[in-house]
Image (cartoon, grey):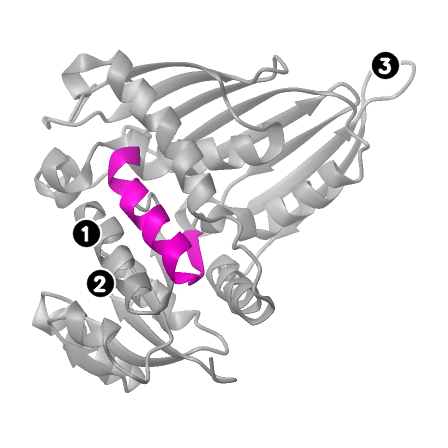
Amino acid sequence: MTEKPGVAIVGCGLIGEKRASHLGAGQLVACADTNQERSLALAHRTGARPTTDWREIISAQDVDIVVVCTTNDMLAHISRESVLAGKHVLVEKPAARNLKELEPLIEAADQSGCAVRVGFNHRYHPSFRKAREIYESEVMGRMMFIRGRYGHGGRVGYEKEWRADPQISGGGELLDQGVHLIDLSRWFLGDFEKIHGQLDTCFWEMAVEDNAFMTLRTNENTTAFLHVTWTEWKNLFCMEIYGTDAKLQIDGLGGSYGTESLTYYKMLPEMGPPEVESWQYTGSDISWEIEFQDFLEDIRLGRAPSPGLEDAAATLRVVDEVYGQNPRFSY
């Protein structure tokens, strides 16, 4: 791969636009979308050549990396064809609609030797990077549990968008924001072996769930209590990570979710009120840029991306189990 790799984006909607804005050292040379207006708009802004056929992109000689930002039904397929064409891939979460759909991509990536990173960009928010640093310093004691909430309220006509069509999306809020909370919880607690979930459609008239409630438990008896919702009328993100000696609390993600912050509560030997230290992170969301720079390092060093396909598979195992427990939402 050249020092400044050629990057192509497939899917020029909101996420494709965000990815294009945060490529950093990458160079966008091509963009594809079945909606010609969207590909032309991104091309006009970036100087990339537009197309409505993603196959042109993955066969192009000047493309080294393909960033896949399509609807869920095409993520795994386009990513698989890209790695078989010898391209490295950054694929948006959840990488596939279910684990079965992901497996051919895993096999193709193994055969090709190409790097595949999965876009769980929340790991790259500064609050989580700092939280991970504290966690790895081993000051929290034994991990006990995580409590996480994540939600937004949709918008007028949300029930008519592609996320409400299970044939395209593969599921509702569980596959939308739920996979972020599952991935982040697994990052701190490890794999979940005992899974229980309840899905509901509380407000929106749609075939998919607008709320998901989960209790996920590891073999070490640590638990994640998670709730994701499309009926959070004021956008909210909150994750609390509890150890026997300390607690970490992340609030907000910037923008409509409020100022991003991390609070560290250190338990004292005499118990009582803990010592408290807080950090606030203002400014634009740079998680996308840091994530892509890390991917360039993955490729340069020949290391396995993290989060990668193994992480996507672990998350989708949880998702598949929860959908299986809720037959109405088994797609």
Amino acid type, residue under disc 3 in the picture? Met
The one nearer the camera, 188 or 303, is 303
Q: Residues within 10 Å of mark 2 (few under 14, many from 20)?
A: many
Position in image of residue 122 (x %, y %): 49, 47
Residue 236 makes an appearance in the image:
no
Q: Amino acid at mark 1?
A: Met
Q: Quadrant of the C terminus?
A: top left
Residues shaded magenta: 99-118
Q: Quadrant of residue 268?
A: top right
Q: Position of residue 2 (x, y in %)?
A: 48, 84
Position of 125 with respect to 99 (left or right) is right
Amino acid type, label 2: Gly
Compared with 246, 92 (above or below) is below
How far apart, in angstroms, are the residues tagged by discs 3 and 2? 52 Å
Marks 2 and 1: CB-CB under 8 Å? yes
Q: What residue is rendered at 33% in x and 62% in y?
A: 83
Vertical side of 85 occupied by 323: above or below: above
- Residue corresponding to mark 3: 271
Check disc 3: other Cα within 10 Å, few if <14, some if 14-19, many if 20+.
few
Single out the mark in the foreground, 2 or 1: 1
Question: Which dot, 3 or 1, sits closer to the camera?
Answer: 1
Sequence-earlier tag: 3 or 1: 1
- Camera-nearest residue between 286 and 144: 144
Q: Is residue 313 above or below residue 294?
A: above
Membership of 107 in magenta stretch: yes
Q: Which mark is residue 106?
A: none
Indicate left or right for 252 with 275 as reference.
left
The residue pinned by badge 2 equals 11
The residue to which callout 1 is attached is 74
